Image (cartoon, rainbow, N blue to C red):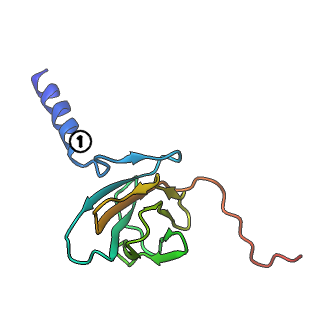
Amino acid sequence: MKIKIILIFGCFLIIISCSTNKNLTPTYNKGGYNINLSNTKQNASKINIVGQVFDVTNGKPLSHSEVIIGCLKSKTSLNGKYSIILDNSSKTFFVKTGSIGYKSVETDFINLAEEDEITINFYLMEDDRPFNNCEGATK
């Protein structure tokens, strides 16, 4: 009996420690994001937005995802990282990201005060809707 309890407790601890979604702001489509604001006081005229895009289920980075802020777009690298630089006049904005085969995630509006660097990590849920193959389609 003691061994069963110890094994169950051990499995519970492993599951909790492997969670990649700590402090995740949930979205309507089972994905989410987390934000970390900082002020490095290096360049007051620019806001640097950096982060990574991950699969919410397995925590693996998603390459070639698109991150959009207004008219600015960035693609993630092979390890899911992105970087966008805004001018400091953009004090209120939201960020949207998406990847082929995944549901998109959009942040709430972000209101800045003195921050000049923001880290936003996105966690996307695989899209379970059927994908239409349009090859060979005619009008």
> Quick check: 138 above or below 62?
below
- Give the side of residue 10 with respect to residue 133, left or right: left
Which corner quadrant of the image does residue 120 belong to?
Answer: bottom left
Residue 29 shown left or right of residue 90 in the figure: right
Query: How many neighbours does mark 1 have within 10 angstroms: few (below 14), some (14-19), or many (20 or more)?
Result: few
Label 1: which secondary element: helix
Q: Residue 126 in the image: x percent, y percent? A: 51, 56
Q: As rendered, which of 25 and 64 lies closer to the eye?
A: 25
Q: Residue furthest top?
A: 1
Which residue is drawn at the image coordinates 46% and 77% (left, top)? 74
Percent x, y of residue 138: 86, 77
Question: Can residue 55 be seen from the camera position used here?
Answer: no
Residue at 45%, 51% (x, y): give it.
31
User: Among all residues in the image, which is located at the extreme right?
Assistant: 139
Residue at 29% x, 52% y is: 20
15 to 55, vertically: above or below: above
The residue at the far left in this view is: 2
Quadrant holding the N terminus: top left
Q: Amino acid at mark 1?
A: Ile
Left/right placement of residue 42 relative to residue 106 reads left
Instruction: Give how far across and how far down residue 91 sits, in percent.
Output: 41, 63
Q: Is residue 126 visible?
A: yes
Q: Residue 83 placed where, x, y %? A: 36, 75
User: Nearest the camera: 127 or 91?
Assistant: 91
Residue drawn 52% across the image and 45% down it: 28
Near-viewer residue (121 or 8): 121
Q: How many marks can you see?
A: 1
Q: Which residue is mark 1?
A: 16
